[in-house]
Structures are given as C-alpha cells and as structure tokens.
C-alpha cells in the first residue's frame, strides 16, 4: 500500500498528476513541491493574452487554492528541491525539510537557453518562461519602445506579435534562413513571415547576434554582419533545455532529458517523470523524443499518475502543438521527421491551408494554418497510421478524412 | 453571478456560480467539473472542453466561429448543439444555462 507520493514541479504536468491521482482514488499523502511561489498555472498565455493584459493572473491558475485543500494536497510552493536520495527515498528542500516518499514524480520542465554573448547580462535583457518573467517585460512594453527579439521560434514570434499589438517597435532577429525553421515547412514560415511584416514587425533572418551593447542597460544589439539594432528592451527566445540537474545528481539516467520508458518510469523503479524534462519513447513514431508541449506534459502526467498507482498504462499519443500569432492559429499534429514528401492543401493567400507530411502514403504530420478541420482529422488519421491518397490529398476541396 | 448547470458524464448535476467575463470552460475547471478536460486552456486548439448546450439555450448564444466549427466537426460524437465551452463567454443573461458534458472528449 502506497502511503506517500511526492511530485516535484508545479507546472502543467504536476497539476495534471494531482488531478489524476485523486480522481483515481489515491488517498495517501500527496505532496507538491514547486520552486515558483504561485499555485500551478498555465504557461501558454504568458506570451499572449497575459502579457498583453487581457487575461488576469487568477485566470492562469488550473485550480484555485480550495481545490488543493479539498483534495488534501500538501503544497510546498516557492521551495526548491536541492537533493534527491533514491536509496533513502527522500527529497531534501533548500530550507532543510526532508520529505520521504514511496513513489516520486519529477515534473521539472525546461529552462530557457541563455545567451552567452558579451552583453547578455545587461539590464533589459529578458527571457520569458515563468510568471515572474512577465512583469518586467510588461513594464518595458510602452508605446514606441524599441523591442529586439532574439530568436524567431514560437516564443519569440508570439511575443513579437503581442509587443507589436501593444504598440512597440519590434525587430525579430533569426539565425536561420527562415522563422520556425525547425518546426514548420517553408510554406508555413513564409506565411507567418508575411503576417509579421504586414503587422509592422521588422523581421530579419540569416543573422547572428554577436553582442549586446549598452552602459549598464541594453542600448543595441549587434550582429555578425556589423548591423546594429537600437533596443530599449531585448527578449531572448532561443530554445529551452530540459531541467535534469536534480535527477542526474541522484544518478538517474539522463540524456537530453530524464530517460523514461513508455510507462514514464525512470531508471529508478520508484521514480517517474513527465513533461518537458523527459526523454521518452514515442510508440507511434518508433523513436525517442523530448517534447516541449502542453499536450505532452498533460498526457505523460496522466499516464505517469496511473503507473504510480501500478496500473501499467503506456504513454502512446500523437503529439500536438499550437501557436497564436496575431489573429492566426497554427495547429501542428504529429512529428514531421523522416518524411519523404510534403503536400500543400489549400491556398496560403486565402489565409487557411495545411501542409501534410507523408512517408510513402502514411501520414506523419500536419501543419494547419487557420484550418482546424484538417488538424482535427489529422489527429485521428495519424494515430490510425492511415494511408493517404496523394491526389485527393492535394485537393483542398476534399476533406482530409476523405483523402484516404 | 449567473448560475450555470453542468450535467457530468455520469449524470451528476453540478450547479456552479460563474463570474461574468470568464468562459464556461474556466468555470467548469475552477469547480472541477468532471469530463471538461480543457487541455489547451482555452486556445481553441484541442476540442477537449466539448459540451452539448441545452437546445433551449443553444440559439441564444453567439454562434461558433469557423475555427470552433472545424474543431467540433471532428470532436467525439458531435451534435447540432455541440460547442467548445472555452469559446462561450459568460454574460449576465446566462443565469440557468444548462450544458451536458459528453461521455468522452475524444
């Protein structure tokens, strides 16, 4: 009989695990340790409606405090777990408290990759990952403030769109030859570039930041080609790194994330992990992956919670992702690596289209721009390993689910 | 505060007081209504907050936009009165609104 389950990490995964554990009847001691002071909250709005002020902080919360009281969750918020002792089955917090567990769930998330160039430590250089990061950025988002965003990925572009809407003068600097190059097809990059430029964003690709200059605080960003971009504020969105220090110091297998199996179990049988911090097998795609997404955090946490209770459930989901930029919604399902052809459906000029990735006739992934029908149909088709008819597929007039 | 009625998948009737301005999904989540998963948190990106709106109320609500329609078409067992609860903003005149949570979200 399990008496104590401890969860480290109060993000999407940690919150979901609590929900599943209690719904599934776990009645023992449940402790949530989180290094942020807030109750578990949603991160996606931080670069969008929360940053713009359209969404109040209490709407970010998954559950209000009463839920945790009612479900007898012992909260240790604003507390950092500094040591994990798998042999003693014990976690030690920075304030000295030691908590013993029967089973442990690590939902440690990921941290922003930091810039290392000269000037990276100047005042006015920001990262956007947690709630506490938002207020200083908001304070700098004044009309006509010059905001330089380093990195044309999801975070950079969503933040660019929000800052632009707030009246800032926005420049995005991207190292690759196109934005979101690691996650979307060229047609999708092209479409979103067009949207950003049409909204007045100064978008520059193929450029490498070499240093940030300023006296005390940021004044300009300098690129390898000698160009210089005046800045009142810099926001860096150059990727994230799985948080694994606690796990690796405890001897758990880590390799670009905490290595877990399809049951979300780590190399220690009493320790499970879920979310951005895991390197896990994708059963559908037959390889190991590390994903940064709400969906993965949610689903893995649910699976991990069931396995904490010895239910023997495998994590076997098709991942999906979304991004909101201006009034556009990008919906992605599946993983696009290993494809051998891409099929465009619809016309980007009509502001609603999708790109399908095929291996042979098998549908691997779909990127849908303002096209929820294709996206929803693809979720099912990809999970079922549907074989598509490429001719029908290329006809945007034929529903995706009929193009088999 | 308008009172909203959720019929959970197992038939349990949950009456919750919901502040004007938040969405039906947020009201469900805050009160832990069973079956409203709301994975994406209201971005109209997951279709896991699907509900059936009492037909007497369905016509009184703002109709769904294209994105929501597209999500619903491939949601679990969609019906004419299907909506994503994240796309319904609670207004003062919604007192007594009744929605049924489907057996599954996908």
Image (spheres, rainbow, N blue to C red):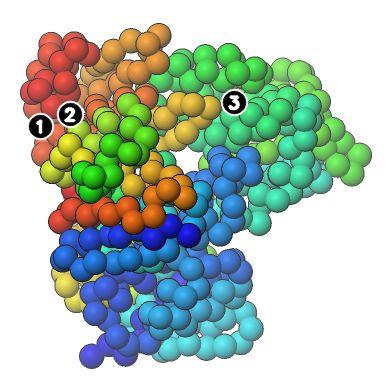
Disc 3 versus disc 1: nearer the observer? 1
Q: Quadrant of residue A390?
A: top left
Q: Give the residue at the far right of this rendering.
A: A215
Disc 2 versus disc 3: nearer the observer? 2
Rounded to the nearest angstrom, the CA distance separating label 2 from label 3 is: 30 Å
Rounded to the nearest angstrom, the CA distance separating label 1 from label 2 is: 6 Å
Q: Position of residue B93 (x, y in %)?
A: 42, 48
Q: In which quarter of the image is residue A95?
A: bottom right
Indicate the chain on which mark 3 is placed.
Answer: A
Residue at 55% x, 40% y is A48
Disc 2 vs disc 3: Cβ atoms closer than 8 Å? Answer: no
Tell me the number on the disc at residue A363: 2
Indicate the chain on which mark 1 is placed.
Answer: A
Q: What element carries label 3?
A: loop
Q: Is mark 2 on a helix, strand or loop?
A: strand
Q: Mark 1 points at which residue?
A: A386
Disc 1 vs disc 2: Cβ atoms closer than 8 Å? Answer: yes
Q: Name the residue under label 3.
A: A174
Rounded to the nearest angstrom, the CA distance separating label 3 from label 1 is: 36 Å
Q: Position of residue A141 (x, y in %)?
A: 74, 37
On the question of residue A390 being in view, the answer is: no
Label 1 CA crowd tier, 10 Å (few <14, some 14–19, many 20+): some
């Amino acid at each position: 009989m399990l008496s104590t389950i401890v969860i480290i990490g109060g993000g999407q995964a940690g919150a979901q695990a609590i929900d599943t554990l209690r719904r599934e009847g776990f009645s023992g001691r449940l402790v949530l340790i989180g290094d942020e002071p807030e109750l578990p909250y949603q991160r996606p709005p931080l670069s969008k409606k929360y940053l713009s002020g359209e969404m109040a902080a209490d709407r970010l919360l998954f559950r209000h405090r009463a839920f945790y009281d009612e479900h007898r969750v012992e909260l240790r918020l604003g507390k950092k777990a500094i040591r994990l002792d798998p042999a003693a089955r014990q976690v030690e917090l920075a304030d000295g408290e030691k908590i013993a567990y029967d089973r442990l769930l690590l939902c440690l998330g990921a941290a922003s990759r930091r810039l290392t160039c000269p000037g990276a430590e100047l005042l006015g250089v920001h990262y956007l990952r947690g709630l506490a990061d938002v207020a200083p950025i908001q304070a700098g988002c004044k009309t006509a403030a010059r905001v330089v965003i380093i990195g044309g990925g999801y975070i950079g572009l969503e933040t660019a769109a929000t800052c632009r809407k707030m009246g800032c003068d926005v420049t995005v600097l991207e190292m690759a030859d196109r934005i979101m190059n690691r996650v979307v097809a060229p047609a999708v990059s092209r479409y979103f570039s067009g949207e950003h430029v049409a909204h007045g964003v100064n978008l520059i690709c193929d450029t490498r930041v070499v240093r940030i200059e300023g006296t005390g605080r940021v004044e300009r960003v300098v690129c390898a080609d000698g160009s210089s971009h005046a800045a009142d504020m810099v926001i860096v969105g150059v990727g994230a790194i799985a948080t694994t220090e606690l796990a690796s110091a405890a001897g758990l297998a880590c390799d670009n994330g905490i290595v877990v199996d399809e049951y979300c179990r780590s190399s220690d049988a009493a320790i499970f992990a879920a979310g951005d911090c895991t390197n896990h097998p994708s059963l559908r795609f037959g390889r190991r992956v590390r994903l940064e997404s709400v969906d993965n955090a949610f689903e893995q946490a649910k699976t991990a919670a069931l396995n904490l209770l010895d239910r023997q459930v495998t994590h076997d989901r098709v991942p999906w992702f979304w991004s909101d930029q201006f009034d556009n919604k990008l919906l992605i399902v599946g993983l696009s690596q290993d494809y051998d052809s891409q099929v465009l459906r619809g016309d980007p000029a009509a502001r609603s289209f999708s790109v399908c990735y095929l291996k042979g006739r098998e549908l691997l992934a779909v990127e849908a721009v303002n096209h929820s029908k294709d996206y929803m149909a693809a979720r099912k088709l990809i999970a079922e390993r549907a074989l598509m008819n490429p001719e029908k597929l290329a006809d945007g007039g034929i529903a995706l689910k009929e193009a088999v | 505060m308008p009172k909203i009625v959720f019929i959970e998948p197992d038939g349990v009737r949950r009456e919750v007081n919901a502040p004007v301005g938040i969405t039906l999904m947020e009201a469900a989540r805050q009160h832990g209504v069973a079956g409203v998963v709301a994975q994406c948190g209201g971005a109209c990106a997951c279709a896991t907050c699907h509900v059936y709106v009492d037909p007497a109320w369905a016509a009184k609500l703002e109709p769904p936009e294209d994105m929501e329609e597209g999500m619903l078409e491939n949601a679990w067992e969609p019906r004419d009165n299907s909506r994503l609860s994240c796309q319904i903003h609670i207004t003062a005149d919604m007192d007594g609104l009744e929605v049924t949570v489907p057996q599954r979200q996908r």
